[in-house]
Image (tube, rainbow, N blue to C red):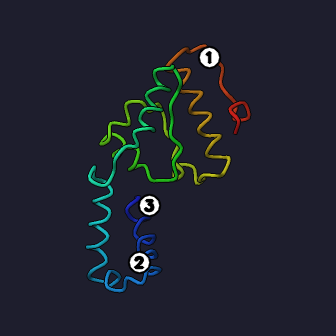
Amino acid sequence: MPPICRCQPRLHLAFCQAGCEEALQEEVFPLVFQRIYSAFGSADVWSPCPEGVAAMRYAKESGLVVGAVCNAYHRYVDNNLPLLGLHRDLDFAVLSHELNSAKPDAAIFEAAARRASAAGRLLHDAALPEIAPHQAGC
């Protein structure tokens, strides 16, 4: 199911819970939804956290593998991070929808440890050993 289809029921529920009856009308909801969905793909609603940018840059300059573990949809990694220039320091991402697992479930962090290990071997030295999840503190 495309991410846009998964977002609609969640937004509909949020409007129900907030008592926004007008937005729930059959002819209105698709328009409201499209406006909100489009805005979330725009740089107008996002800004990088300066401390986070500095931490990512420092980690990369120190030779560390930098990754993201996220419960959001791929759109945030594929579209929004590049809009903000954050993709430059990101070596990998693990997204909950890929695994049917979400934070705080250990499975998503184990997947991140495997990807970090693979990224480290690719970026730094093909001879590095694979890191097992238990070795990464997961």
Residue annotated with mark 1:
128
The spot of residue 66 in percent (x, y) is 50, 31
Distance between mark 1 and mark 2 Cα atoms: 50 Å
Left or right of 43? Residue 2 is right
Please name the amino acid that badge 2 sits on.
Phe
Q: Which quarter of the figure has residue 22?
A: bottom left
Return the mark for residue 1: 3
x 57%, y 49%: residue: 99
Judging by the rendered image, the residue that carries numbered circle 2 is: 15
For the residues carrying marks 1 and 2, which lies nearer the camera in this image? 2
* Of pointers 3 and 2, the one earlier in the residue sequence: 3
- Quadrant of the frame with the N terminus: bottom left
Q: Secondary structure at mark 3?
A: loop
Q: Residue at x 53, y 24 (%)?
A: 64
**x%, y% of residue 118?**
56, 27
Residue visible at 51% across and 35% down? 67
What percent of the width, then of the height, locates residue 108?
61, 46
Q: Quadrant of the C terminus?
A: top right
* Badge 1: residue crowd in 10 Å (few <14, some 14–19, many ≥20): few
Tell me which numbered mark, 1 or 3, is placed earlier along the sequence: 3
